[in-house]
Amino acid sequence: MRRLRYKLTCAALLFSLNLATIFTSVYAWFTAVRKNGASGMSIQMYAHELDLRYQVYKYSDEAKSVINATDRQDALTLLEYDSVFKDRNDNTPILVEFTLLGGAINDGSSIRVTTTCSNASATAKALSNIIELKFALLTPESSDPASLWSEAIDSFESVNGKRFKVGNAKNLSVTYTIENYGASLANDGLHFFMLINYAEDLIEDFDFDLFDSQTTAFSNDLTTIACDVIGG
C-alpha cells in the first residue's frame, strides 16, 4: 500500500582519501511507533596515479544557506525527501567538486571515475536504488558556496544522470569517463563535479507500509569511488 506521505533519510556518504582514516556515520530512522539506529557505511576513495582532492557543498538547515560542508561529519548526508511538499526537495542536491593533479593528466589520456555499490537487489531499500549521479566539467564563475552550488545546479539541468538501478535491472557500478579535457586544465589541476540527488521516479517504485507513515530509511550501500587514468 502506497502511503500518501512519507519521507526518506539516508546514511551519510563519507569519503576517505587516506585509507588510514576511514570515517563512519550513523543514521536513524523513525516510524510512528519506534526508533531504530544502525551503523552507517563508509566510502573509500582511490585515485590511481593522481592526487585527488575534493570539496562538498550542500544546503544546511541550520544556516539556512548552502555551505562548504567538507569538514562536517554529515557532509554527504542527503536531506530528507518530502513526497508531498516537493518544493522542499529543491535543496536536497549535494555538489562535490573534485580536483585532480598529477603528471598522468594530459591531453592524450582519459580519466575514468567509477562509483560502486554493494547491494545487487533492485528492490532493496538501499541508497543506490533511489539516487542519480551526474558528472560534468564545469568552470564556475564564483567561489562562494551558495553561488557556486546554484550555478552548478543550473548547469546540471542539461546533463543526463547515471543510475545504478535501470528499470528492473541493477548495476553495481556507475562509470563516468572524462575525455578531451585539455581546455579545462588549469594551473591548480582539473576540476570536475559530481551531483548526488534523489531520483523521484525511482522513489515512486517503492511501496511503503503503515509503519512508514512518517520517515523511511534507505541504507547506504555505496562502497567506493575510484579514479584511474586510461591511455596517455
Image (cartoon, rainbow, N blue to C red):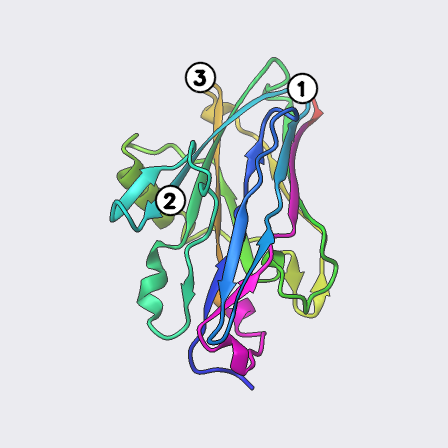
Give, as a three-letter code, the residue at label 3.
Answer: Asp
> Helix or strand or loop: what does disc 3 sit on?
loop
Q: Select label 3 or label 2 by which is in front.
A: 2
The span picked out in magenta is: 201-228
Q: Extreme left residue here?
A: 64
How many angstroms separate mark 1 from mark 2 (CA)?
Answer: 29 Å
Quadrant for residue 170, please give it: bottom right
- Secondary element under disc 1, as helix, strand or loop, is loop
Q: Which residue does the image show at 33% across and 47% down from the upper left?
A: 59
Query: Mark 2 belongs to which amino acid?
Result: Lys
Q: Position of residue 225 (x, y in %)?
A: 63, 38
Instruction: State the residue position of label 1.
Output: 49
Per the rendering, the mark at residue 58 is 2
Q: Which mark is residue 188?
A: 3
Given the current orientation, which residue lies at the most extreme bottom position?
Answer: 1
In the depicted structure, whether residue 19 falls above or below residue 202: above
